[in-house]
Image (cartoon, helix red, strand yellow):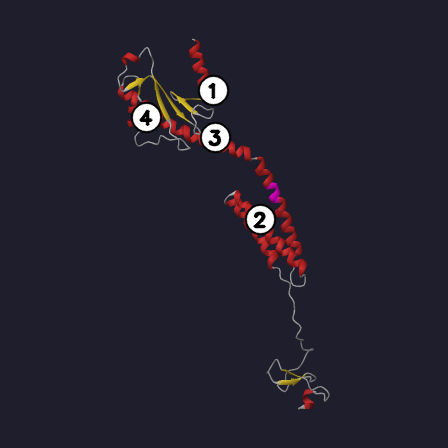
Amino acid sequence: MSAKLGMSAGNTESMLCPCCGGSVLRAASGCACGARFVGEPLDDTPIKVQRLGPAMISVGLLALVVFASAVATKWMAVAAVVVLWSAWRAMKLARRDAEWYGGYRTAATTFSVTLVASLALATYGVAHIPKALENYRIKQVAATQAQMHHIAGLLEEYKLKVGVGAYPNEQVFKELVAGSVTTDYWDGSIKYQSRPDPIAETSISLISTGTSYELRSAGPDGIVGNDDDIIMRDGIFFTNAEIKKQTVGRQLR
């Protein structure tokens, strides 16, 4: 057997045959099962393979944030903070142990792109804050005006139904709008006031005391008489400043 395996008397270190599992001397050229050695056996030194997971996770997070911002809402861009943290972690791992962790350039590129895009979006957002606040204010005012239009429609229907050419007094008004929303966007009460015409006052019934009316919302501050009041008179909107000018004009006459 020694002749067949080509054993050397000076080398008695053995190993397992990868074919049959039998014990074979390392110096032999083959095994009794017929298997032949084609090279030196591998040593026990572990093979290190660089891990690209942390770097690729940061890339995947960046793609996810971009997709969510484009499809869902732009506020998802705030999640870029997570991308920055993930890319920074991947860079830190690659610098600390380059033999085990790779993808440093990929992580650095992801970090740079995300940082520049975040700064650009932040600048854009700060610059458009005044416009966003103004749009929000316009939305609030529009919602209140829509509610006033609804109330004005009920008043006009009442005027036609009663047939006296006048709008209801405050008591009848409460009965008229019962079941309807009479609050503004800020949950403040929309004030109603009938405004009588002195010339026609004698011909108006007790339940209809005015040929004109006013609806007024105190606005966001909840204080009546300020410039943010929302005022409707006979279906037309006025600012508080315009109402004051009308009052002064009538007094001068």
Do residues under tags 2 and 4 come within 8 Å of each other at their CB atoms? no
For the residues marked 3 and 1, what is the alpha-carbon distance in whole angstroms? 18 Å
For the residues marked 1 and 4, what is the alpha-carbon distance in whole angstroms? 27 Å
Residue farthest along the top direction in this orientation:
253
* Near-viewer residue (227 or 182): 227
Q: Which is in the foreground here, disc 3 or disc 1?
A: 1
Q: Residue at x 64, y 54 (%)?
A: 106
* Near-viewer residue (43 or 21): 43
Do residues under tags 3 and 1 come within 8 Å of each other at their CB atoms? no
Residue stretch in magenta: 117-121
Q: Which is in the foreground here, disc 2 or disc 4?
A: 2
Q: Amino acid at mark 1?
A: Ala
Q: Amino acid at mark 4?
A: Leu
- Residue located beneath label 4 in the image: 154
Which disc number belongs to residue 6?
none
Of labels 3 and 1, earlier in sequence is 3
What is the magenta segment's predominant secondary structure?
Answer: helix
